[in-house]
Image (cartoon, grey):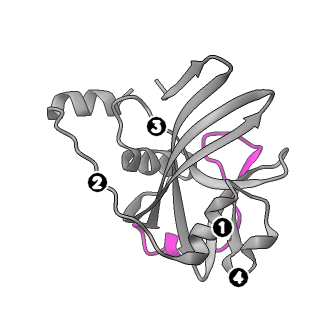
């Protein structure tokens, strides 16, 4: 179950995003029916850590495995979408593809889950301000290139952790 909770007139989301940079370009996704780009990632599932979320999401959407390199930021994000108000907490990681051949990819990628409206594009970091990337604060985080430390404490027994990650 995704960590999305209805609270009064808001939806509280817990989300994790990933920054993958190759050749000074960042990989983002875009719904072809929308007017903005966003970081790859998705909602954290109950019992799943945020770094596990980005690994799962990239594998589900692109069929690619990643290695987490660094923790970049926590973003508290307030926005409206489809007439709903959101309060979102997003954990952002930097990662690389595990496979060396995947590190050479430069073309637009398609969603392997069957969502024909979702595509994955490489945006030039030198022109990042020209793109409608949300949340917008990610642009300044990337340009400043100073990242905080984040630690995950997981005292759950392995069987519970495994059970939670298979849902």
Q: CA distance from mark 4 to mark 3?
A: 30 Å
Please give the residue where the numbered disc 3 appears in the rendered image: 44
What residue appears at the point 28 percent right and 48 percent down from the top-left corner?
152
Mark earlier in primary sequence (1, 2) = 1
24 horizontally vs 164: left or right: right
Mark 2 burial class by Cα count in 10 Å: few <14, some 14-19, many 20+: few
Closer to the observer: label 2 or label 3? 2
Please give the residue where the numbered disc 1 appears in the rendered image: 139
Q: Secondary structure at mark 3?
A: loop
Kindly check if marks 4 and 3 are in contact, taking CB atoms under 8 A apart as contact: no
Mark 3 burial class by Cα count in 10 Å: few <14, some 14-19, many 20+: many
Q: CA distance from mark 4 to mark 1?
A: 11 Å
Q: CA distance from mark 1 to mark 3?
A: 23 Å
Mark earlier in primary sequence (1, 3) = 3
114 in magenta: yes
Mark 1 burial class by Cα count in 10 Å: few <14, some 14-19, many 20+: some
97 horizontally vs 31: left or right: left
Please give the residue where the numbered disc 4 appears in the rendered image: 126
What residue appears at the point 18 percent right and 33 percent down from the top-left corner?
156
Mark earlier in primary sequence (4, 2) = 4
Mark earlier in primary sequence (2, 3) = 3
Find the magenta span and give its range: 97-119
91 in magenta: no
């Amino acid at each position: 179950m995704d960590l999305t909770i209805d609270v009064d007139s808001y939806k509280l989301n817990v989300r994790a995003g990933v920054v993958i940079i190759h050749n000074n370009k960042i990989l983002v996704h875009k719904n072809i029916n929308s007017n903005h780009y966003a970081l790859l990632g998705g909602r954290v599932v109950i019992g799943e850590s945020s770094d596990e979320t980005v690994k799962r999401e990239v594998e589900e959407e692109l069929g690619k495995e990643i290695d987490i390199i660094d923790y970049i930021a926590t973003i508290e994000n307030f926005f409206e979408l489809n007439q709903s108000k959101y309060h979102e907490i997003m954990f952002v990681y930097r990662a690389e593809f595990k496979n060396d051949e995947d590190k050479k990819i430069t073309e637009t990628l398609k969603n392997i889950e069957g969502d024909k409206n979702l595509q994955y594009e490489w945006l030039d970091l030198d022109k990042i301000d020209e793109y409608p990337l949300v949340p917008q604060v990610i642009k300044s985080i990337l340009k400043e290139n100073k990242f905080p430390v984040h630690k995950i404490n997981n005292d759950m027994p392995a069987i519970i952790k495994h059970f939670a990650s298979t849902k």
